[in-house]
Amino acid sequence: MVNTMNKKRTISIRHPQLIKFRNTLREVISTAEDVELGKLLDEGKGLKPTESDADGKRVRDISDKWQKLETAWKKSLCTCSLCGSRSSNMTFNTHFKAWFCVTCYKEHQKFYDTKAREGEIWNAEDVYRTPSTEWWP
């Protein structure tokens, strides 16, 4: 499968009716996510992972489903990964593979620009967390 999201993308909607439609659709998706999380919560009630292996396996399965649903929601176009805004235009951050509202994206872009020039951005591979500007021109 080819990853088509390898570039920064901003989705901006300016028409008031389309904005209302987008926000309503996001609320519908949010409600569906809440319902699914509620079902998982109900399914897990009364389970005690320490009592039997069957309960432990069901708790792990429910926990995995919960985690996947939460991750999918947080990385979706419906909500900003930082501030949780559901009514903003969004920009895709290729490094984090997540959507951010335009405001958060700009604020954090300024932060990274400043910190990178000061040598305070850390290498993910570096266990000792030494600053690196290797990637910065």
Image (cartoon, rainbow, N blue to C red):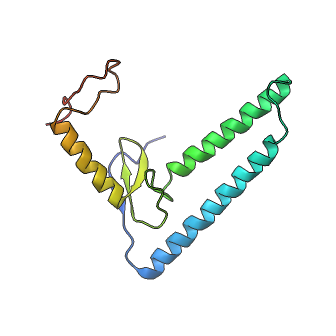
Residue 63 drawn at (x, y percent): 69, 37
Q: Is residue 47 left or right of residue 95?
A: right
Q: Is residue 50 left or right of residue 119?
A: right
Is 70 or 25 nearer to us in this picture? 70
Residue 87 drawn at (x, y percent): 46, 67
Please, is residue 103 above or below residue 63 in the view? below
Indicate the quadrant containing the C terminus: top left, top right, bottom left or bottom right: top left
Q: Is residue 53 left or right of residue 26?
A: right
Please, is residue 98 above or below residue 121 in the view? below
Q: Is residue 118 left or right of residue 44?
A: left
Q: Quadrant of residue 122?
A: top left
Please, is residue 26 above or below residue 9 in the view? below
Residue 129 drawn at (x, y percent): 31, 23
Q: Residue at x 61, y 61 (%)?
A: 29
Q: Residue at x 62, y 46 (%)?
A: 69
Residue closest to the far left = 137
Is 39 or 46 nearer to us in this picture? 46
Residue 114 drawn at (x, y percent): 19, 43
Q: Residue at x 33, y 54 (%)?
A: 105
